[in-house]
Image (cartoon, coloured by chain):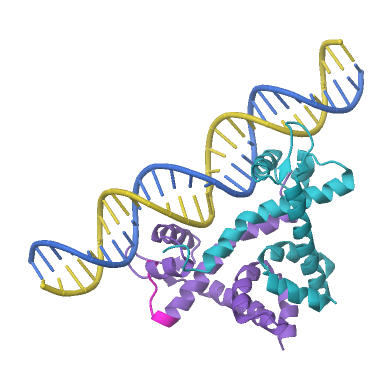
Chain colours: A purple, B cyan, C blue, D yellow
Amino acid sequence: MNKSNSQYSNIRNQNKNEILEDYVEAIQEIAEIKGDVKNSDLSIHFGVSQATVNKNLKRLINFNLAKSEPYRSIFLTKEGKKLAAISREKHEIVYQFLLKLGVSKKVAQYDSEGIEHHVSEETLRLMKKFNK
Amino acid sequence: MNKSNSQYSNIRNQNKNEILEDYVEAIQEIAEIKGDVKNSDLSIHFGVSQATVNKNLKRLINFNLAKSEPYRSIFLTKEGKKLAAISREKHEIVYQFLLKLGVSKKVAQYDSEGIEHHVSEETLRLMKKFNK
DNA sequence: TGTCATTTTTAGCCTAGGCTAAAAATTATA
DNA sequence: TATAATTTTTAGCCTAGGCTAAAAATGACA
């Protein structure tokens, strides 16, 4: 009935940050490869329309994770970079973990993108340990 | 730009079935424990309002996963039971896997709920193997 | 430099999944 | 069996995350 009495709602709430994390991760990645990041890069990366990217970008800016002047390139704020680094590390740990488990590269890539948002610190620590 | 050229959108799309799977799983569980399943049981289980349960239930019925007459108990269809069984098995494999990895019961419970929707068949098979 | 192509933004639409408040139906009890 | 309490449904709202189509800005190039 209310929010506090269920562990479940937390999982659903976590979804809200997923897309933000994915965006900062992608922006960081593209910036490293191509130098700067445009709306269209993200549109291709996520397989969504530019209008959608635009809308999500506004949320990112609102959360002080990214900066961008109209029609110009996209940059991460300090906060955005921090989140990107954390996300990437999580992603990498899960990805390596799946490989270690025997999962194929392709599937490990795919599954890790979904799983990275649902592993707690404890699980992450154990995956890291398993990877060594 | 379009849907077909990105693996990413598939992950987002999968979210659409998450809630359906969670509902059939919960309905099955509650039915086994209490005999029948009411709107209010699900409301408590998921920590959402009864109005929300009602709306989601309608989607379940639309997808031919559940049946219910107004103000009466909720039942799974054959299809719903099938999906519930599959979901439960997935959930159980992931849960046991996390325990085997060394994750605490509480966290394994929590994380497995999130992860179960993001493991492919291949990963699931390897987790199962690891569990033995 | 003016025109055309491309990119970005805006506007307006949709569905999913939340909520509250109020109405309707059911269940319990005096 | 009325009435009160509870449960379920409905109505109407909101945000997130998609879309298309059209307008606005930028960039290319003849």
Whether residue B113 is visible? yes
Name the foreground residue: B21 vs A112: B21
Q: Position of residue D29 (x, y in %)?
A: 16, 74
Start and end of the magenta stretch? Answer: A33-39
- Circle count: 0
Q: Quadrant of the C terminus of chain B?
A: bottom right
Q: Quadrant of the N terminus of chain B?
A: bottom left
Give me the residue at 78% from left, 42% from top: B75
Up the image or down, A50 lies above or below D9; here it is below
Up the image or down, A40 lies above or below D4; here it is below
C9 relative to A31 in the view: left or right:
left
Name the foreground residue: A18 vs B98: B98
Image-quadrant location for residue B98 = bottom right
Give me the residue at 61% from left, 58% from top: B15
Whether residue B101 is visible? no
Q: Position of residue A61 (x, y in %)?
A: 45, 62
Give me the residue at 60% from left, 71% from top: A113
Q: Position of residue A68 (x, y in %)?
A: 38, 66
Give me the residue at 42% from left, 66% from top: A43
C30 relative to A84 in the view: left or right:
right
